[in-house]
Amino acid sequence: MKISAVIVSRNDNYGGHLNERATYAINSAIETYDEVFYVDWNSDKHSLIYDIKDNLQLKGNLKHIAIEPSVASILTNYDPHAQKCCEVLARNIAIKRATGDYIVSTNIDIIQPKREDILKLIEEKGTTNFFTTVSRREVEWEYIKKFQGGDYNFSNWNAFRDDAYKTSVPRNKLESTTPGDEYSIINCCGDFQLATKDVWHSIKGFEEDLIYPLYSDTNVQMKAKLNGYDLTGQFTPPLFHINHGSKGWGGGGFAEGINKKANDITKAISKQQESRNSEDWGFSNINIEYETF
């Protein structure tokens, strides 16, 4: 069984210590998954990968796509209010090109679960007709540094994960963030979304007209349920969000002025029926190059 992961970000140091948090996250993804697509969207200088490459434990399964600002503008139809890191488009580019039997859509500050626990989750489902999201557990950056002896110690990142596996406590609470929303299931549902490649392709990935912040992760889960797939929220296996406070893309980045327009909730949720994506979703009609590390 082959599992792919999709991660998107932008080289803007959102939340602070982005390079350090991303190093932990991508190293964990490299170890856990057979294939990892990192899509760097709209970075002003260069891709984040080039800043952290020397601290990554590479083994030939990291595929890197860089969408430069000029190209990002074209792909968002020059909309000045498009999300600076346009997640729906970046994720679809990778989902469309991922080769795994299963695909995980996840984030740049998530320390991934161990592979054997994801395989156990899949086995326990007893079916391939599911779409599931796993609730994150919070860890503080200062706690990680303290555990590592006051240093980043990137080469020993998995010692921290082993410890967090034993000491962390799951949320154990299903919740939604919008009144009347039965689809998000857990808060921050987009930190880990798992389905087969066939399911992702059946629902045509993320809705590509939701180019602003908010509701796109809930929307993709709604699409899965509308298409007859079993939508569930999980509290295991453990995955860990490296907390960066309120700054950054969280909550849409409105407080910091990063983004200034949100997706229309009625369009994203209550009015969603069949996918509005074209047959070329993920820009599958365009040859997009990637490099492998």
Image (cartoon, rainbow, N blue to C red):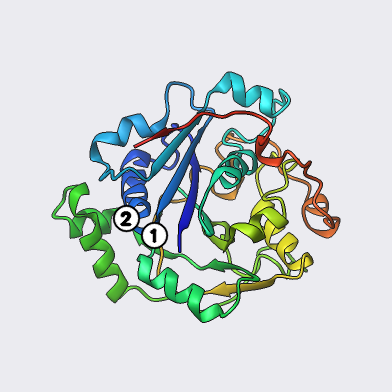
Pointers 2 and 1 in contact (CB under 8 A)? yes
Q: Is residue 171 visible?
A: no
User: Which amino acid type is shown beneath numbered disc 1?
Assistant: Gln
Residue 50 image offset from top left, x and y in percent: 34, 29
Q: Is residue 172 placed above or below 255 in the rendered structure? A: below
Give the residue at mark 1.
112
Residue at the (47%, 53%) spot, across then down: 4
Please give the name of the residue rendered at 69% of the width and 29% of the height, measured from the top-left corner.
76
Q: Is residue 200 left or right of residue 170?
A: right
Q: Secondary structure at mark 2?
A: helix
- Quarter occupied by residue 111: bottom left
Q: Position of residue 157 (x, y in %)?
A: 24, 55
Q: Quadrant of the N terminus?
A: bottom left
Q: Which residue is mark 2?
A: 31
User: Observer-nearest residue: 193 or 5?
Assistant: 5
Number of residue marks: 2
Residue 151: assigned label? none
Front residue (pair 196, 165): 196
- Residue at point 77%, 65% (across, down): 227
In primary-sequence order, the first of circles 2 and 1 is 2
Locate residue 179 relative to residue 2 in the image: left or right.
right
Frontmost residue, 229 versus 254: 229
Seen as rendered, the residue at the extreme top is: 70
Q: What amino acid is labelled 2 in the image?
A: Glu
Which is closer to the viewer, label 2 or label 1? 2
